[in-house]
Amino acid sequence: MNVMMLLEMANAAFPERTAFTDGSSGESFTYSELFEAARHRAASVRASGASRLVKLDVSNLATPLSLFTSAWAGVPFVPLNYRLTDTEIEALLKRVTPAYLVTQEDRVVSLGGVDQVNAVASADFLDPSQHSQVVDGEWSMDPDEIAVLLFTSGTTGEPKAAVLRHKHLVSYILSSVEFASAPEEDASLVCVPPYHIAGIAAVMSSVYSGRHVIQLPNFTAEAWVQLAREHKVTTAFVVPTMLARIVELLEAEGEETANMPHLNSLAYGGGKMPLSVIQKAMQFFPNTDFSNAYGLTETSSTICVLGPDEHRETASSSDPKVQRRLVSVGRGLPGVEIEIRDDEGKLLGPGERGEIYVRGEQVSGEYEGRGAVTDAQGWFPTRDAGSMDDEGYLFLEGRADDVIVRGGENLSPGEIEDVMLTHPSVADAAVVGIPDEQWGEAVAAVVVAKAGSSVDLDALKAMIQEQLRSSRVPQVIEIWKELPYNETGKLLRRVVKADLSKA
C-alpha cells in the first residue's frame, strides 16, 4: 500500500482527464501530467539526499505534486503552516532535516540558509525544465512507511508531529471512496489549507474518484462563489465559518437561492456548525446534498458523517430528538468504532458526556518521537468531549480540557452553548471558565447577535436557567461582533477566555 497507487490507478483509467486547476492562475494538470511530473520530481528529491519533502506555500499545483512526489521518492510529506512566523517555521524545519523544501520565492533565500535545507521555489518545482531526470525504480509498497507528518497547532505547548503511515491514509480512502466514481464533468472546489488533514484527504479522495479539483488558495466568500459558478462546481468542502460567510454573501445578494444548480454536494466540518447557519444554507441550496464530517489528523481525516438523507430527515421532522441530530456529526464510518468514556476510562451510556475514543484501521494515534498513544486494544483518546444518543449519533462538546470546574462540579461549555444557540436572536456563542475566588471557576460567555437583532441578556440568562439550572447560567455575558476562529474553523476558546478574564 502506498499513496502513489491512488494516482497510478487514476492515470491508468483516465490519463487525459483534468486533475487539478489552480483557481488563481488557471494552470492545470491532467492525471498523466501529474503522474509524470511526480516521477521526475521524485528523482530530484532523491538526488538531494533529503529525508523529508516539506511544502510551505498556499494551495497550488505544487501541493498535489509534492504529496505524490514524496510517496514515490519514499520520504514523508511535511506540509507546514505558512501563516506561522519565520522563527516558528525555522524551529519546525530543524526538526525535519535533511529536507527538500518547496516554498514561496521570497522565502527561498532565508529558509534555504537553514542547515540541511534544500529550498526550491514553488515555480521552479513546477518547471519541468529543471527536473530532467526520472526516478530509478518504482515506489515502496511497505504499508508501514511514513506517508505524512502533520504538525499540531501547539496551542498548549510545542507542536507535535502526528505520524500518518501509508496504511492509514490508503485504508481511509479505500473504505470511504469508490474508485472512478466521479463523472468527467464533476469538479470539486477545495479551499481548506494544504497543511490541514482535510486538504490532504481532499487531494487523495478526488484523485481516487477521478474528480477535477479547483484550488482556492485564500478563501473569501466572493472568490468561492465566483469559482463555484465559473467552473460549475459539483462538490465542495468548507468549515463552518466559511459557510457562514457564504450564507451572509448570498443573503446580501437578495436572491432566494444560490443560483448553483450544479452543486450536488456540500460537505462541512472542522468545527461546530451553528444551527441557524446550516438551516439557511439548506434553503439557499435546496437541491444540494449536505454532509457533516468529523475527523482528526491522527485518524487520517473523517471518522463520522451525518449524511444527506439524515440532513433532510432532521430538517423535516417534528420530533425534537430527531431535529437535534442536525447539530450532530452523525455516526461512525464502516470500520470505525467510537466510545464515550469518563475521566477514569469507564464506558458511558447514551446521553452521558465524556471523552471521545476511536478505533479502526485508519487510526494512527502516533506522534514522532513519542510513539503511539493508543491503548492496548488500539483505542485512541481524541481529547474531544462529546456524547452519543441511543442510535449512535455523536454530538461534540468541545475539547475535553475545556470543561469548567465550578465548585467541584464539572460543566460542559457545549451543553450551555447549545441552549444559547436556540435563542432566536443569537447567531453564535462561546462559553468558557474564568477565575473566581468563591467557586474556583465561573461560567462566562460571549454571544453574537443575528443581523438586525439585539440580544436581551437577562432573557437569555433566564432561558438557560429554565432549560438547565442556575449553576450553568453565565456570570458574565458579553456581546461581540464575531467570535475568533482559526482558518480551519476551530473556535479559539483560549482567546475568548483571555479577553473575558481581563473584564
Image (cartoon, grey):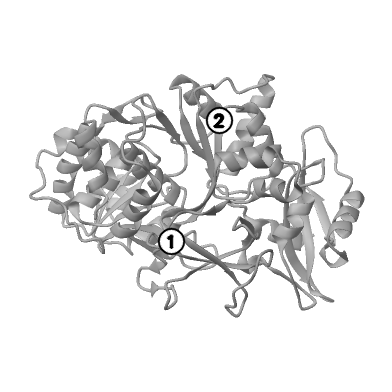
**Relative side of 119 to 341, left or right:** left
The one nearer the camera, 211 or 71, is: 211
* Label 2: element kind: loop
**Relative side of 159 to 79, left or right:** right
Q: Which residue is mark 1?
A: 298
Instruction: Classify 10 Å Cα crowding around label 2: few (below 14), some (14-19), many (20 and above).
Output: many
Classify the position of the C terminus by image quarter: bottom right
The residue at 47%/48% (across/down) is 83
Q: Earlier in the sequence, mark 2 or mark 1?
A: 2
Amino acid type assigned to the residue bearing label 1 in the image:
Glu
Amino acid type assigned to the residue bearing label 2 in the image:
Thr
The one nearer the camera, 430 or 182, is: 182
The image position of residue 145, as x and y in percent, is 25, 62
Q: Which residue is mark 2?
A: 288
* Label 1: element kind: helix
The one nearer the camera, 265 or 337, is: 337
Q: Is residue 121 visible?
A: no
Classify the position of the N terminus by image quarter: bottom left
Picture mark count = 2
The residue at 61%/67% (across/down) is 400
**Relative side of 287 to 205, left or right:** right
